[in-house]
Amino acid sequence: DAGVIQSPRHEVTEMGQEVTLRCKPISGHDYLFWYRQTMMRGLELLIYFNNNVPIDDSGMPEDRFSAKMPNASFSTLKIQPSEPRDSAVYFCASSPSGRRTGELFFGEGSRLTVL
Amino acid sequence: KQEVTQIPAALSVPEGENLVLNCSFTDSAIYNLQWFRQDPGKGLTSLLLIQSSQREQTSGRLNASLDKSSGRSTLYIAASQPGDSATYLCAAASRYNNNDMRFGAGTRLTVKP
């Protein structure tokens, strides 16, 4: 398996623009997580899905952030409108259920810069 | 709310040295504790996962221990190599929601040749 795949790897945009980050989890994993990493706050969980259903979005900072998982192999995190303080690395991770529940597999991240 | 702390923030050692990285957590009601490695500009790679019922896990030169009563975990790296240079993060998952995982800020390790 290719692992968790994220795109784009880098995104530079201007304040006010819409940003869409994409994630393909590992096939067969039931859980998908979106994290944000900054120097100031470290890694923060934004939202996670179980079997394509959003379970906990309490980490989503504002209504400007939204996430979807239309099927088991694809998820998006959207920021509209973007602001400079959204600049961070956004990671997608997936996890299997069963015996290996809780073991997280991360993508390489999408580095977002909002000017 | 679970707080995870890693001290020191940075560590530099000569090649070949054995070393210990520390992780402490405030709430002992954990489901598991996981150690990750992060290389610059990359994602996190899971190194070791210790379930709450376990005391330690080993993989090659790595050994992770867990002491829930004291709220501590350690990652022991034997015979360190320059290729071990990276940031090491620990994360504690809540017993009440094992998908609620709190990360430490990490220890940046440099192994000098």
Image (spheres, coloured by chain):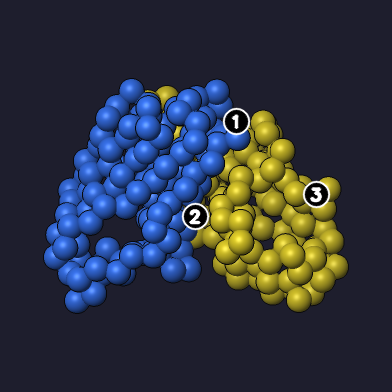
Chain colours: A yellow, B blue
At x 33%, y 65%, the residue is B11
At x 66%, y 46%, the residue is A46
Which quarter of the rendering shows the C terminus of chain B?
Answer: bottom left
Image coords of residue B78 (percent x, y):
17, 54
Position of B3 compared to B111: left or right? right
Disc 2 versus disc 3: distance between alpha carbons? 23 Å
At mark 1, the secondary structure is: loop
Image coords of residue A2 (percent x, y):
42, 53
Q: Which residue is mark 1?
A: A51
Q: Are there few (<14), some (14-19), or many (20+) residues within 10 Å of tag 1? A: some
Q: Quadrant of residue B24?
A: top left
Question: What's the residue type where badge 2 is placed?
Answer: Ala
Question: What's the residue type where badge 3 is placed?
Answer: Glu
Q: Which residue is mark 3?
A: A62
Q: Which chain letter matches label 1?
A: A
Question: What's the residue type where badge 1 is placed?
Answer: Asn
A70 and A102: which one is in front? A102
Q: Is residue A27 visible?
A: no
Q: Is residue A34 above or below residue A103?
A: below
A87 and A8: which one is in front? A87
Disc 2 versus disc 1: distance between alpha carbons? 30 Å
Q: Kindly indicate whether the residue at mark 3 contacts the one at mark 1 (C-beta within 8 angstroms).
A: no
Q: Quick check: do tags 2 and 1 share a chain? A: no
At x 24%, y 74%, the residue is B112
